[in-house]
């Protein structure tokens, strides 16, 4: 019997879950997962950088920030045709969700935003979910994206509110929450999560999850990222996390937000097959599929497909209207 979904989690309750004996934690998460999610089903999402580099934000983890010297360079925005060709390839390779990211601080009205709207319409016409991550946006811009058919808007909170200022100084936590409010009011689903391994405490991780799990309704999509330490960024010397910490975050997110798609995201290329399987067992049911995540390396597509075959997983695909509800491919 399903328990009532909660929206009133406290920091101490979440810390207790995060720090539980691992086998107990994973068992609890998998039990919740099977109550609310299709078993043995993992969604494949593809992520494309449609505008690279030159971002005025100073996010300490990000190689696209103009504040950091990483040798990435700045590229102009891709054409609509180029993006839709990439989306078609992603669909042919099994992806059901296509995510488009632009290195902008905020959306500005004009030809570039008009092109993004055309990209969204084109991706939806392929029968795929369409997600964008474009920085901050206004309520009117969110409504325009909704009218174009956008399925989801990604705008990560990155970490807990108390640690946020140690990672980003060019915008506030409240700025991010305001954008999420605009997205929700426009009727677009939320894709919002965070990053671990940036020097934060366990309490900071619990606080991030607390913010997410006290949204009502919960975010439909929760990416869990591990830091990819890039040379030239302020976090270049951060040591890699223990993969079991990622398992714990996936499991806790699943317990707190049973109906969300928990996305095993950045940092996956450093995980063994067994670590990834543990994350799936803990409730992660989506991966980004392709050789790159914006600017960082990702697992090769054929390796992903082989892993899914080896564990007997099906591809999780959206319902006919590409909404947040999903069903396994038959």
Image (cartoon, rainbow, N blue to C red):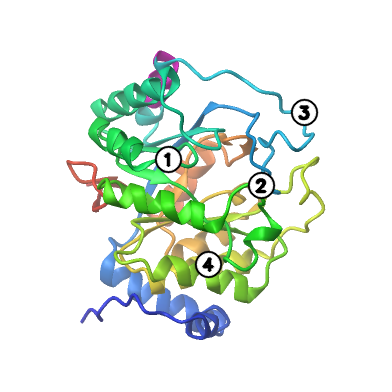
Residue farthest toward the left in the current orientation of the protein: 320
Q: What stretch is highlighted in magenta?
A: 81-89
Name the residue tied to disc 1: 137
Q: In x, y percent, where is residue 83?
A: 43, 21
Distance of label 2 from label 1 (alpha carbons): 18 Å
Q: In x, y percent, where is residue 205?
A: 58, 69
Q: Name the magenta segment's main secondary structure.
A: helix
* 77 sits left or right of 31 in the view: right
Q: Specify few, some or many for label 2: CA neighbours under 10 Å numbering under 14, 14-19, or 20 or more.
A: many
Q: Can residue 162 be seen in this view?
A: yes
Q: Which residue is drawn at 28% across and 51% down?
A: 185
Seen in the picture, residue 284 relative to 204 is either above or below; the reply is above
Mark 3 vs mark 2: in front: 2
Picture quarter with the N terminus = bottom left
Magenta region includes residue 85: yes
Q: Specify few, some or many for label 4: CA neighbours under 10 Å numbering under 14, 14-19, or 20 or more.
A: many
Name the residue tied to disc 2: 59
Disc 4, SS: helix
Comparing 44 with 114, the one in front is: 114
* 235 sits left or right of 267 in the view: right
Mark 1 vs mark 3: in front: 1
Kindly identify which numbered label has been placed on residue 208. 4
Could you say which quadrant of the image residue 280 lies in? Answer: bottom left
Name the residue tied to disc 3: 71
Q: Which of marks 4 and 1 is nearer the N terminus?
A: 1
Disc 1, SS: loop
């Amino acid at each position: 019997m399903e328990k009532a979904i909660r929206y009133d989690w406290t920091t101490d309750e979440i810390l207790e879950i995060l720090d539980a004996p691992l086998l107990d934690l994973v068992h609890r998460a998998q039990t919740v997962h099977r109550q609310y999610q299709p078993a043995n089903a993992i969604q494949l999402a593809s992520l494309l950088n449609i505008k690279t580099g030159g971002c005025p934000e100073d996010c300490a983890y990000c190689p696209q920030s103009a504040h950091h010297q990483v040798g990435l360079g700045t590229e102009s925005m891709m054409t609509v045709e180029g993006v839709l060709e990439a989306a078609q390839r992603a669909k042919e390779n099994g992806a059901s969700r296509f995510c488009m990211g632009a290195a902008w601080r905020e959306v500005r009205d004009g030809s570039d935003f008009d092109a993004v709207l055309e990209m969204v319409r084109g991706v939806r016409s392929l029968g795929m979910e369409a997600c964008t991550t474009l920085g901050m946006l206004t309520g009117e811009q969110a409504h325009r994206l909704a009218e174009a058919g956008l399925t989801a808007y990604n705008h990560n909170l990155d970490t807990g509110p108390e640690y946020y200022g140690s990672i980003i100084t060019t915008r506030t936590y409240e700025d991010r929450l305001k954008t999420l409010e605009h997205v929700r009011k426009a009727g677009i689903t939320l894709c919002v999560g965070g990053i671990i391994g940036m020097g934060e405490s366990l309490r900071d991780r619990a606080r991030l999850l607390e913010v997410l799990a006290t949204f009502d309704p919960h975010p439909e999509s929760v990416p869990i990222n591990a830091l990819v330490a890039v040379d030239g960024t302020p976090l270049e010397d951060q040591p890699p996390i223990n993969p079991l910490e990622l398992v714990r975050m996936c499991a806790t997110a699943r317990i707190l937000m049973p109906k969300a798609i928990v996305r095993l995201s950045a940092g996956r290329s450093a995980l063994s097959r067994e670590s990834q399987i543990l994350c799936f067992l803990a409730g992660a049911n989506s991966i980004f599929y392709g050789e790159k995540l914006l600017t960082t390396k990702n697992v090769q597509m054929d390796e992903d497909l082989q892993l899914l075959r080896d564990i007997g997983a099906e591809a999780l695909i959206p319902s006919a209207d590409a909404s947040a509800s999903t069903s396994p491919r038959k």
